[in-house]
Image (cartoon, grey):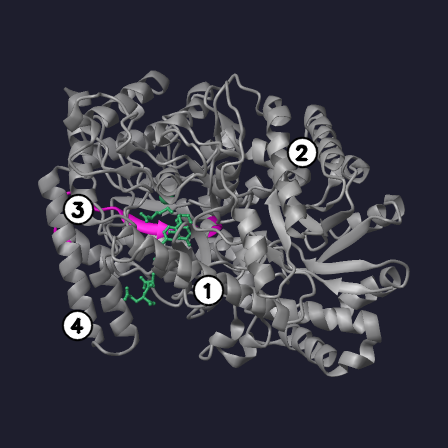
Amino acid sequence: MTVQVATLGFPRIGARRELKKALESFWAGTSTKADLHQAAEHLRAEAWSRQKAQGADIIPSNDFSFYDHVLDTSAMVGAVPEIYGKVDGNVDLTTYFAMARGRQVKGESHEDCGCGKHSHSSDVPAAEMTKWFDTNYHYLVPEFSADQTFRLSSTKIIDEYREAKEQGHDTRPVLLGPVSFLLLGKGRDASLNRLDLLGSLLPVYADVLTKLHEAGAQWVQIDEPALVLDLEDATQAAFKQAYQSLTQAVPAIKLLLTTYFGGLGHNLDTALSLPVHGLHLDLVRAPEQLDTVLSKAHPDLLLSLGVIDGRNIWRADLNAILDRLEPIAAKRDIIIAPSCSLLHTPIDLERETTLDPEVKSWLAFAVQKIGELSTLAKALNQGRDAVRAALDESAAAVKSRKNSVRIHNTAVKERAAQKDASLAKRLSPFPVRQKAQEEALHLPLFPTTTIGSFPQTKEVRQARAKHAKKEISTADYEAFLKEQTASAIKWQEETGLDVLVHGEFERNDMVQYFGEQLSGFVFTKHAWVQSYGSRYVRPPIIYGDVTRPAPMTLDWWKYAQSCTQKPLKGMLTGPVTILNWSFVRDDQPRSETCRQIAFAIRDEVQDLEKAGCPVIQIDEAALREGLPLRRQDWKTYLDWAVESFRITSSGVQDKTQIHTHMCYSEFNDIIESIAAMDADVISIETARSKMELLEAFTDHHYPAEIGPGVYDIHSPRIPTVSEMADLLVAAEKKVSRRQLWVNPDCGLKTRRWEEVRPAIANLVAAARELRG
Ligand SMILES: Nc1nc2c(c(=O)[nH]1)N[C@@H](CNc1ccc(C(=O)N[C@@H](CCC(=O)N[C@@H](CCC(=O)N[C@@H](CCC(=O)O)C(=O)O)C(=O)O)C(=O)O)cc1)CN2
Ligand SMILES: [Zn+2]
């Protein structure tokens, strides 16, 4: 029997962030469309040949994207909301980027033209963006109208298949499946049942499959990650309808139904009943499903086994995987693959030349993971002896990581093991604290604030890069940062904000900055992973027990507060977010690692309070994102996540106001847990969804104060006063005015000062209008 190696998707950004550079210069008008296409073509060629060279037998095409593959799918089927203009023929780049980023042509905003609405084609907001399952990758939410029709409007998938073929690669194109696509989208009005659109969507998918077949494709990887979610009967029926219809329409093409981020669970029988030729399983997150699938699957169903973790960076235990695979490979042909697309891992470990060698020997990035698969396949096809050296190396890495003394710290473990309930409880209930805080802070109604960061300008990033390369001294770097901070504070005072921030100029990233100062973490130099569009992150790697050797933010807060009489917020990242946005050790439960981080941040909170900090924000932007995909696993997660937050926030007096911030969060289902965090103020993202998110807070009578974002900071558009005032009026209908704060959706680090200054001035004006 033969074993083949496949990949389901490769990082698209380039080992040197070539895609970011190509996109940002195109958007800035300093390069042409042809330059952008050329850069993309080069990246694709390199990804294909790299995967081949590492030993992948089956490689994907159409995993590349200029911005996001869900947006690509919307473009493919012509799901382009009217506000972006009528699409005849193919969706062009201008329309594509307008959906991704919004579009605002100077001097033509709707205020100037007097049209009074957003439908003016030169001023359109971006489509809504949200988290891709439980990852830190964001996709653009497809939006469907009641009279939605679909039409093939992009030939990207066929073009890229052909492009690869010209380079000698017969790829397996990747297509986001029709059911997951519909479920990831939303109806313009809530009454629309997305699955009702399936019948009109399927012909476009059939058309695509036909064209791929005509171009020579034998197999298509059709991703249906929705199959790992809790699904209603109607959705299961939709799967049957979809795949019966597609197989009937295009019987010649073979479909690999691809599931990831979890197990099939109660959808297993549905998945096995679909008339497809292959099925991919995530055996890292859900190893237990393999036995059932093996016993139930038709012998002709080609199984693709996701045995290498596509969501983490640890080197695999190849011998253990072989123990599992050998008996299976003796009986049937199989494909082995990463558990999911490698989009969520950095590209190449070899570029990390300064990483601690011991830790480095424990790691594998995308390229190395394909190498691991190729070793596994050789062992299965030719016997373990054919790859003895590689297997021994894997065993040695596993052993060294298990036994390393650097991982374990008894004092940390003992502290985290404390069960004293008072550690996670504020002194008084919220109403008492609210009073104490009113007396301490004297804030007006509708207090204004921002979420923390101000523009990370080229100047700021360059200064940091120069400091890292020792081209400027620490003293000069710090003087520069102080200047930036002081001028941001002066501007905030002039603009009339009520609670000020220092601007986070000293931080490269809200997680990385803390990780760099905590023990138990290591950092990479080049290990970027796409978060959204051209924005990438370098997640820290947590390998050992976590401690805080020294205060991390205290001096910056002290300096900033010395510049103003107004309250200046201390700004911290919470333990759940540090956990969720790092690559986490897999040798102990995540809850344990989170608790260790919680104690480290608690110490920082107490240091800030001692220094006189009146308001402390502990960001938990990733709390919702870490929610397990299956409802049955929610409670356990929420219990420890909320407890960790409370450990960090509960060591302070009543008068110290604790804020938290969350972006992109669907709160309806978890509002009790959000309330249980017991923060005094929570700021949330609501601008793009037009305050829809506030429903959760209304219906459940959220007890504390709320800042629903009125400024969509992920778009370069500058919101007007009336637009923000309207949002606040809408908010006031849902929660009482005494509860309301006025703030943007999120931090302003990705924006330019030219956008931030007028936008925040408008925001303050909107708050004043409401007060008046
Ligand atoms: N971890 C994380 N996840 C998050 C967020 C977040 O803030 N952090 N926010 C939400 C949205 N996601 C985001 C993700 C990334 C960025 C972002 O701005 N990323 C920056 C990189 C931030 C960073 O690490 N910057 C470093 C390195 C910057 C850099 O590129 N330096 C240059 C040199 C400087 C120059 O010449 O410009 C280089 O290395 O070549 C620094 O400032 O020090 C980017 O892509 O541009 C924003 C939002 C959700 N998830
Ligand atoms: Zn945010």
Residue 569 painted magenta: yes
Q: Mark 4 points at which residue?
A: 476
Residue numbers of the magenta segment: 562-576
Q: Does the residue labelled 3 lie within 8 Å of ligand 1?
A: no
Provide the secondary structure element on which disc 4 rests.
helix
**First along the sequence among labels 2 and 3:** 2
Provide the secondary structure element on which disc 2 rests.
loop
How many residues crowd around disc 1 within 10 Å: few (fewer than 14), some, or many (20 or more)? some
Name above or below for residue 232 compared with residue 134.
above
How many residues crowd around disc 3 within 10 Å: few (fewer than 14), some, or many (20 or more)? few
Marks 3, 1: nearer the viewer: 1
Q: Which mark is residue 42?
A: 1
Rendered-image quadrant of the C terminus:
top left
Marks 2, 3: nearer the viewer: 3
**First along the sequence among labels 4 and 2:** 2
| Amino acid type assigned to the residue bearing label 2 in the image | Asp
Are dots 2 and 1 in contact, CB under 8 Å? no
| Amino acid type assigned to the residue bearing label 4 in the image | Asp
**First along the sequence among labels 3 and 1:** 1
User: Which residue is more in the foreground, 589 or 77?
Assistant: 77
Q: Is residue 642 among the parts visible in the rendering? A: no
Name above or below for residue 63 compared with residue 385.
above
User: What is the distance, in whole Å, between disc 3 and disc 4 at their CAs?
Assistant: 26 Å
Q: Which residue is drawn at 27% across and 35% down?
A: 743
- Tell me where residue 559 appears, x and y as whole percent: 18, 58
* Left or right relative to 131: residue 752: left
| Amino acid type assigned to the residue bearing label 1 in the image | His
Rendered-image quadrant of the N terminus:
bottom right
